[in-house]
Structures are given as C-alpha cells and as structure tokens.
Image (cartoon, grey):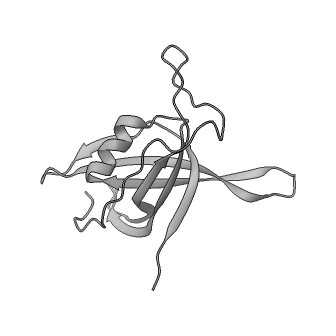
Amino acid sequence: MLNTVVLIGRLTRDPELRYTPQGSAVCNFSLAVDRPFTNQSGERETDFVDIVAWRQLGEQVAQHLRKGRLAAVQGRLQIRSFEGKDGQRRRVAEVVADTVRFLDRPRAAGEGGAPTGPGSGSAQESADFGDEQEAPF
C-alpha cells in the first residue's frame, strides 16, 4: 500500500512549535496550495492543508519558516479522531511531514520578512526523518 503526499504552497501562518511531555518537538503549520485548474469563473481555488512536523524537522521548520514563505512538503496523510470540548467526536486530516524544503529566501531585515517571488532561489534546507510513532496530543 502507498500513502504519499507531495505539496507545494505558502504558509498561511507562522509555525507553532510545542513539545510533548516526553520531550519530542512537534510543529504545526498550514499550507495554501492552489488547485491545478480554474473554476467556472476562471479563478483558481485554494486548499488549506494542515501539516505536522516532528522532532528536529519540526524545530527547523519553526526556526526558518514564517507566514508567506514557499515550501514543499513530502509526507503521509493521517486521519485522526478526537473528542471535542463539547463531547462530540471529530476527525481531522493532516499531512505528517517526512521532508520539508524551503523554496524561497527570506528578504533582508527591514523588508518585512516576506518571501521573494517564486523561483527566486533554490531550496535552502531539507531534512529527512522517519515516521513518528508517538500519538499526537
């Protein structure tokens, strides 16, 4: 069986880094990914995909990426369920990242830290880590 996801998009918010009680780093962020076709109005629709990066990869993402940066994520789709504060069962789909590539360079200090245009540079960093066996919070 195969469960592989590859996405390229821009971060919709700054990454959030936390640590499990066992001390493992876990970083959550979201990518805005354009669909490869236009709708009936001629506009591209966008999907917002939740990403989870564990351990050293999560720490690197939190250190180097910010809202608006272009990134490529390779990982696996994970569907998990939990009980909400209202007692209802909820399901969430997220991508557990194995690799994150930083596809643009941050602007110089004083320029707001926004990304440069697409294709403005090669990947700055990449990291490969194995699957995480700990259960998310």
Viewport quadrant of the N terminus: bottom left
Residue projecting furthest to the front: 122
Question: Which residue is located at x 49 percent, y 71 percent?
Answer: 4
Q: Position of residue 9 (x, y in %)?
A: 58, 48
Nearer to us in this view, 58 or 116: 116
Nearer to us in this view, 110 or 15: 110
Residue 59 found in image quarter: top left
Residue projecting furthest to the bottom: 1
Residue projecting furthest to the right: 41
2 relative to 81, above or below:
below
Q: Position of residue 62 (x, y in %)?
A: 36, 39
Question: Which residue is located at x 44 percent, y 61 percent?
Answer: 94
Question: Which residue is located at x 47 percent, y 54 percent?
Answer: 50
40 relative to 109, above or below:
below
Is residue 91 shown left or right of residue 48? left
Q: Position of residue 19 (x, y in %)?
A: 21, 46
Nearer to us in this view, 101 or 114: 101
Question: Which residue is located at x 57 percent, y 31 percent?
Answer: 115
Viewport quadrant of the C terminus: bottom left
Residue projecting furthest to the left: 22
Q: Position of residue 29 (x, y in %)?
A: 43, 46
92 relative to 20, above or below:
below
Is residue 113 shown left or right of residue 17? right
Residue 7 found in image quarter: bottom right
